[in-house]
Amino acid sequence: MNDLNTQDAYEPAQDPEVLAKLESLLSERFGSEMHRINQIKPHLWTIDQPGYKLFVMVTHLLVIFDAVLFATVSDKKTELFEELLVLNAHQVRNSKLCLVQGQVHLRVICEYRQVNAEVFESCFQEFGDLFPVFHDQLSGPFYPDPQGDGGTLTPQNP
């Protein structure tokens, strides 16, 4: 019987082989642009992307690509929550919109055993494709301001 509980799934990875694999994939993907990557902890990296900071976290079971979509929850909470549910229901890929400590995040999650160069690139592509779409779709109705982001695209820890 597996003694691993749900909480353990989110504990930081300690497996040097897995961490080395992720470092290698990041190096492969970013090559000469490695200056955009900052390794905060052995299992946590930040990557400067246009308009946001992407976090890559490795846990015992998962690789999580995460960024703050909006740093606050809209005043129209109920409508926002309904829209997040609708958007999540229509996604067939690995991405999900979620609430984390009062912030709206976009996450792409995959099992770390499945991560290879193709899956890794696919996760980055999915994230890059969906972040601006979700941001634009939610900005107008829930975060109306002149910049369209509610002043929320400041880098924050997930």
Image (cartoon, rainbow, N blue to C red):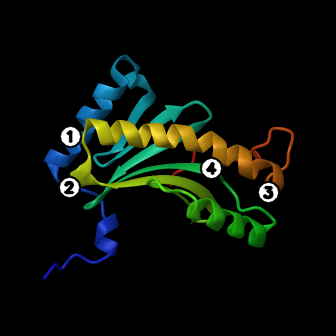
Residue type, mark 3 in image = Phe
Whether pointer 3 and pointer 2 mark residues with C-beta atoms closer than 8 Å, the reply is no
The single residue placed furthest to the top in the displayed view is 32
Q: What residue is rendered at 57% in x and 55% in y?
A: 105
Whether pointer 2 and pointer 4 mark residues with C-beta atoms closer than 8 Å, the reply is no
Q: CA distance from mark 1 to mark 2?
A: 12 Å
Q: CA distance from mark 1 to mark 3?
A: 39 Å
Q: What residue is rendered at 22% in x and 75% in y?
A: 4
Q: Position of residue 28 (x, y in %)?
A: 28, 26
Q: Which residue is mark 1?
A: 21
* Among the 4 quarters of the image, the one containing residue 75: bottom right
Q: Foreground mark, 1 or 2?
A: 1
- The residue carrying pointer 2 sits among few (fewer than 14), some (14 to 19) or many (20 or more) residues within 10 Å by Cα, namely few
Q: Earlier in the sequence, mark 3 or mark 4?
A: 4
Disc 3 element: helix
Find residue 69 and name its label. 4
Between 100 and 90, the one nearer to me in the picture: 90
